[in-house]
Amino acid sequence: MHRLVPEKLVTVITTDVLEHRLVAAVRRRGASGYTLLRAGGAGSDGLQSGNLEIDTNLLLKVILPPERMSGLLDDLDALIGQGYHLTVFVSDVSVLGHEKFERPMQT
Amino acid sequence: MSAFSNLLIPAVLFFALGFIARLIKSDLRFPPDLAKILSIYLLVSIGLHGGVELANADLGAALAAVIWALVLGFLLPIIAFGLLLAMRRVEPLDAAAIAAHYGSVSAGTFLTAIAFLSSQGIDYERYPLIMLAVMESPAIVVGLLLASWSRGRAAKASASRSEDTGRGQGHLGDILREAFTNGSVVLLIGSMLIGAIANPTAMESLHPFTTDIFMGMLCLFLLEMGLEAGRRFGDFRRVGLALGAFGLVMPLIGGVIGVLVGHLMLGFGVGGTTLVGVLSASASYIAVPPAMRLAVPEANPSFYLTLSLGVTFPFNVVVGIPIYYQMALLLVGKA
């Protein structure tokens, strides 16, 4: 029987110019790591083809313990408050080997 | 005849091919990142060319070109902003973001203009290459100033919502740093410096890279830009007819100003004057969009990207360049 532990998965989709700010927030809020993909799509900001430097989105996934999530969400909320277009959603996930999700990244 | 000769340059034909492929819903698509690679190639190669010319340039003339590039970079967004506000079709913050694009330049349009001049056998001054590098960033500063002015005015109009102040702008210093350290700007200016200081004999070995394959790479790049423009053609309806018209009128205004500056202020011949016209007429899709996204998040990117990539770029490539050339001919030709 595998020992699965519940964690939170925060997914953010937004323009890739915000990369530095998002990564800084993820580090500051004590996440153990993150995964970042370049993405294309369309929405309130119009088409983001992902083909040019200027119209590429990013898809950021962070798994972190539930008690550290709200700090990160505060930071994301602040960005939305500044007018940036962020798609943010949270899912419940179960992880294998949960110890590594408890250790914040080296800063 | 000469009015259509621009359409028969391979690069422009490839642009048309991309555009049409998209309109007929072909599944033609570049592999991911190829457009970014082509864009890096073009910036490096144009930078090296410019650097070599810069090394042999007359300092006074180069300085005059830089100063006028700055003047155009600061002046054009203000004209665009005024025009957009007078049209009353977009919010002031959208107008500020769009205006910044029109003060900056499009390297793709500039290179197409060089292909056009070469195909006509017209020689051109090399100083516009320096202007291209200089004009990428000043418009961003003007865009930021216009945006903060618009925010101030909006805050005054709704003084009760004081919590709204501080929206978007972040740290001005950070945004300026990011604008001037934009990857493309660093690549262009860095390549220019390398071209200027590198041993000329060693530079000869780069000739196949920077010159021989250049036009072919430009064709591929314009094919992708055609696909991109075609993709955005659908967004045209969202932008609306009036704003679309702005995307056609503003380059003509910029073109006239550029041609006048090119000949009367800088004393260029037909080729150089045409190129300054093209620089002033074109709208950025390199350094300005990310800067505006970061600094003016309230503005809708689909406005400025559709105008820059979907309206003004195709207009300049297909129709604009021959027009600015004819203007330059009128001004310079008989003098």
Image: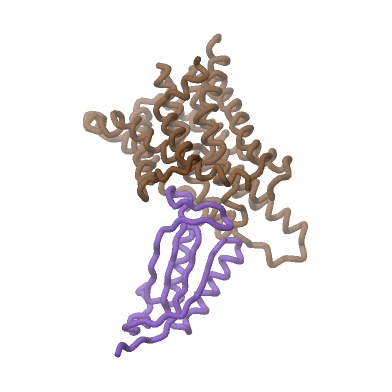
Chain colours: A purple, B brown
What count of labels does the image hold? 0
Q: Residue at x 69, y 40 (%)?
A: B82
Q: Is residue A41 above or below residue B60?
A: below
Residue A34 image point, x, y percent:
39, 70
Q: Where does the N terminus of chain A fall, quadrant-wise? A: bottom left
Quadrant of residue B296 within the rendered picture? bottom right
B45 up-or-down from B330: above or below: below
Residue lying furthest top = B334
Q: Give above or below for B201 relative to B283.
A: above
Observer-nearest of B44 and B315: B315
Query: Along the line of sight, which residue is nearer the eye, B5 or B208?
Result: B5
> Residue B263 location in percent, x, y?
54, 20
Relative to B195, residue A35 above or below: below
Q: Percent x, y for residue B145?
A: 62, 48
Specify the quadrant of the image occupied by residue B35: top left
Name which residue lies at 44% across and 48% down: A52
Q: Residue at x 52, y 79 (%)?
A: A70
Query: What residue is drawn where x is 47% and y is 70%?
Result: A11
